[in-house]
Image (cartoon, rainbow, N blue to C red):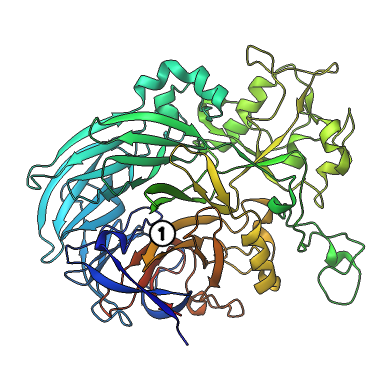
Amino acid sequence: MMKFKISVLLTTLLSVGLVACNENDNATNSPEVVEATPETIKLSLLGRYETKVFVKSAAEIPAYDAASKRLFVVNAQKGLVDVLDASKPAQPVHIAELSARTYLANSEVNSVAVKNGIVAIAVQAENKTDTGMVVFFNAKDLSFISKVSVGALPDMLTFSPDAKTVLVANEAEPNDDYSVDPEGSISIIDISNIQQPKASVAGFSAWNNQKSDLLAKGVRIFGPNASVAQDLEPEYITISADSKTAWVTLQENNAIARIDIAQQKVTDIYPLGYKDHSLVENALDVSDRDCDPKTDCNGDGVIDTKDKDKGILNIKPWAGLVGMYQPDSIANYQVNGQTYLVTANEGDSRAWLKDADAYFGGDTSKGFVEEIRVKDLFKSSGFTNKVKDEYPAHLQKIAVGVKGARLNASTFGYCGATTTDAKGCREDSQLGRLKVTWTKGYQMNQDGSPKLDADGYLVYDKLYAYGARSFSIWNTQGQLVWDSGSEFEKKIAELFPKYFNSDHEEVTFDKRSAAKGPEPEGITVGTIGKKTFAFIGLERMSGIMAYDITTPNKPKFIQYFTTRNFVETDIAQQGDLGPEGLIFVSAKDSPNGKPLLVVGNEVSGSTAVYQVNLQ
């Protein structure tokens, strides 16, 4: 039996959403409507469009146009946008494609958004460090409208709620050897005359002389020889309901930037801090090989060599370990006139290589890699006895004359570390398999140079892992209001113990524990009646977490939904894999009159339509 509370809401409050790369920009003008407030919701599969192309990112970012009842989905495998007829959402049909290659040769589409019958696509140049473009099309007849140049590597774009501007996150990644590193920026496109859009830039060059202050506050700025503007890489954007302010995730930098849209200016950069994994509520599984070889870990009833290198469910706190939130996607919603930001804390490392052999051989001009396993960073033999691909060239550079690295025994003694050796902490069953950044955590002198112990070793007081394996709610100044803690991993362990932390390309128990766990990437929020719900895509486990976030400091877990078939060996029969982008479609805009969740799945190449059932 469904129990509803009736409320009258303005249509602008009925649907608030942002996908992994786009906001749900499909609201239409209509009078006030009456919408039921559910006690809870439940997701179910309604329909699906399949490209039949697997592990090629053939379905990534969806957008929906209510007037034409069409879905526009980024197909990275083809470098264009697939257009789907969703008038019958149980059976989406491919009807056309949108490409920008006529306007920018050999280009690729990264993102798509729709508003008031206008489709905007973010287009990356063949050489990603070159200037990109935004191209506008008519959603109804798919005709070209206009185009405008933007920054390097436009990775995401979104319309403002008032439909007057389009904002673009120009990620501006470096090339593979880091010899070219464009400045990250946000393009603000005035579309008051859609035939002649005008782009302005909100950049970070004004922050170049504030590098020391930003570092002191906790913003990560660590690219080789990079200025602040070069190092900051805008990822995703969410815009306030009044269209005056935007917030942009700077994923690698573990920060959020605030944009004043009218002034076309970056007004603040908020460091997000770190998640303390020593706390019980922030426990996690850090190894894919944490089985004791003297235990029957593979469950065959025999203790033998087959038990070696196996993983187990081992969610627990780890002192000295912190997680960098590093959110990918971001959304916002309002409660009692207060705006809150919602993030999916995926995590991301920098790894650029033009020549791996040369780079790991010590040539810093051939790339930049920050990621390293704990067991390799703290080898008892030190940095001198390295093997191939073990120590990044930039670590070797700062470690000239340094014998190796040690863990601070006062913190890491619990896993076996002493003042002279990391010992047991290096074991696969402890912290050894976990991937961390070598760029942060070691003791430094006041001038920022490495501080060595009496034996000439680096000493790490903390270890910094990628992502927080969670979603968070923040205030608009970047202060944490609430975080889901370890709930994602615990729910997965409870519901799918045999497939815990699997990869999205293959069923491999515990494989992702040593990296970023379930990897929450995409997020969207939707308001139904008086309640607001968040939907978070877990990229690796290939499912959707649903939460009631009506009360920002007390969200409630609602459901973990997945269509994945873990038993099936044929990838074509495994369901939806690798959720990338999500959009919420309100009942008033939905082709079947029911609220929907549309998800682009990059591994299965499928666009899934889930119905949000009110209960």
Q: Residues within 10 Å of mark 1 (few under 14, many from 20)?
A: many
Q: Position of residue 320 (x, y in %)?
A: 75, 38
Residue 508 seen anywhere in this rendered image of the structure: no
Question: Image quadrant of residue 59?
Answer: bottom left
For this orientation, the residue located farthest to the bottom is 1
Q: Position of residue 279 (x, y in %)?
A: 73, 47
Up-down relation of residue 54 to residue 373 (above or below): below
Q: Residue at x 47, y 75 (%)?
A: 39
Residue 17 seen anywhere in this rendered image of the structure: yes
Name the secondary structure under disc 1: strand
Residue under numbered circle 1: 524
Q: Residue at x 53, y 35 (%)?
A: 355
**Closer to the camera, 13 or 125?**
13
Question: Image quadrant of residue 400?
Answer: top right
Q: Amino acid at mark 1?
A: Thr
**Closer to the camera, 462 or 400?**
462
**Closer to the camera, 124 or 115?**
115
Up-down relation of residue 265 to residue 331 (above or below): above
Q: Position of residue 465 (x, y in %)?
A: 65, 42
Q: Position of residue 173 (x, y in %)?
A: 41, 36
**Closer to the camera, 549 or 578?**
549
Q: Residue at x 56, y 29 (%)?
A: 218
How many marks the image carries: the answer is 1
